[in-house]
Image (cartoon, helix red, strand yellow):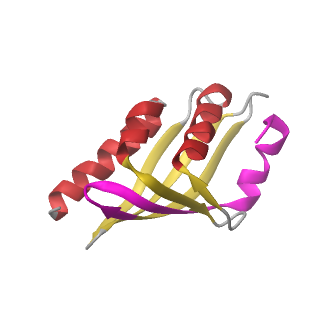
Amino acid sequence: MTPEEIEQFAAHFVDTVQRGDAEAMRDCYAPDGVIWHNTDGKEQSVDENIAVLKWFVETLPDRTYTVQRREVISNGFVQQHVLSATLPDGKKWAMDACVVVTMEGGKIKRLDEYLDSAKGAQLREFGR
């Protein structure tokens, strides 16, 4: 993929997540894609990650992903963003995040997600 194609793919991927479109998001991943989070050090399957997206859609319906910075690399991209939402208790919430995405064949083969663990912990009382 050219750098321009990777940039377009990255924007499309963020859009699918923003809209909560689970099937469009699934289509961005290779069938054997892997998602890893720094907060627990575990790898997730695409299906497990889709379940998280569905939880976010239900729990944080007004969520917004604001891309702060995105850099195309030879086999993917690195992106810094902020996820903002209103929590179910009415409080405003925002979490900084960074993803390192490795692509293969035009799909995400691996996504390493670095999340602010203190902000993530605030979601526990709402089931995550």
Q: Is residue 19 above or below residue 3?
A: above
In screen coordinates, is 120 left or right of 73? right
Q: Is residue 80 above or below residue 17?
A: below
Which residues make up the magenta segment? 102-128
Image x and y of residue 26, in percent = 43, 40
Q: Is residue 88 above or below residue 51?
A: above
Residue at point 36% right, 40% down? 27
Determine the residue located farthest toward the right in the rendered image: 125
Residue at point 80% right, 37% down? 127
Whether residue 122 appears in magenta in the rendering, the answer is yes
Residue at point 85% right, 39% down? 125
Determine the residue located farthest toward the bottom in the rendered image: 74
Q: How many marks?
A: 0
Residue 6 position by quadrant: bottom left
Residue at point 38% right, 34% down? 24
Image x and y of residue 105, in percent = 25, 58
Q: Nearer the viewer, residue 68 or 43?
A: 43
Q: Is residue 74 above or below residue 19?
A: below
In screen coordinates, is 120 left or right of 99? right
